[in-house]
Amino acid sequence: MVQAPIITKPIIKKVPTRLVEPIIYPVPQHGQTTRFGRLLKAILDYMLVIPGLILISPLLFFIAVLVKLDSPGPIIHRRRVLGLNGREFDAFKFRTMYINGDEILAQYPKLQMELAHSYKLKCDPRVSRVGQFLRKFSLDELPQLFNILQQDMSLVGPRIIAPQELVKYGSWGSTRVTVMPGLTGMWQVSGRSDTDYAERIRLDKQYVDNYSLKLDIQIILCTIPAVLKGDGAY
C-alpha cells in the first residue's frame, strides 16, 4: 500500500471519440492500472453516484429551471475534455455563461490574456447571475455525475482539462492520461481556483503517484466542507 501524500494545504478542515494524438501512451505502474484497482474504483463510483442522483434529482430539476429562466440558451453546457488514454469526451455542466460570451470577453483584452495563461478568470463578465451562484458552490458540475455513470470520469481523480492543456504537463502528460479525470480531487479540496496552474499540475501528479482507495475516500469526505465553504470557486 502506497503511503498517502503529505499535502501542503490540508484537505481536512466536473459520444463519438477520437485520440488526441496518434500514439500509444505508455502505462506506468500505479494503483489505477491494475484490473483489481480499476474494479474497486468503479464499484465505489457506482455505489455513491446512483443513490446520490436519485436523492438530488429534485435539486437538478430546480437548477435546470433557474438556468433556463435566467438567460437564453441551453441548460447543459458540453465541454470537450481529455479522458482515459487521451480519448476526448463531452463533460456535462449546467450552463453558467451567457451564450454571447465570446463577444463579451472581446471587450476585455487583459482578461483574454489572463484566460489564455491560467484557463480561469476570477471576475468573468461572461458568467450569468445564476451561474455565479452555481459556480460558488460547484453546483454547475453536478451533471458530471452522468459522466461518471458512463465511466468517462470517476468521482475522484485529476482535474478535467481541455486537449490543448496537456502540453502544460510536459513529459508527465503521458502519465496524466492513464487515469480518468475526477469530479473532485486534490485540487478541489486544496484551494481550487485560488491555486496557480503549476500547483494544480503538482496536485494532479501527487494524486496519481500516491493513489489508494483510502485516499479517494478521504478526498470525498473532505469535498463536502470544501464545497460548502465555497472558497476558491469561480
Image (cartoon, grey):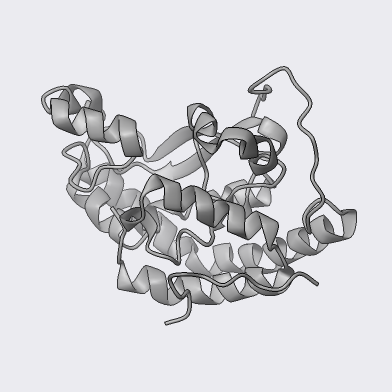
Image position of 134 (left or right of 186): left
Task: Pinpoint residue 225: horizontal percent, then vertical percent.
Answer: 41, 77
Would you say residue 219 is visible in this rendering? yes
Q: Position of residue 108 (x, y in %)?
A: 12, 28
Q: Where 45 falls versus 119 (above or below)?
A: below
Q: Quadrant of residue 48?
A: bottom right
Instruction: Tell me what residue is drawn at x 88 percent, y 60 percent.
Output: 36
Question: Can you see residue 156?
Answer: no
Q: Nearer the viewer, residue 35 or 151?
A: 35
In the drawing, does residue 32 fall left or right of residue 175?
right
- Is 148 rendered above or below residue 55? above
- From this viewpoint, which residue is outermost toward the right? 35
Q: Going by the picture, which residue comes out furthest to the top?
A: 22
Name the spot of residue 184 as percent of width and height, x first.
52, 59
Residue, far left: 107
Give the residue drawn at x 52%, y 53%.
Answer: 202
Q: Specify the quadrant of the image occupied by residue 155.
A: bottom right
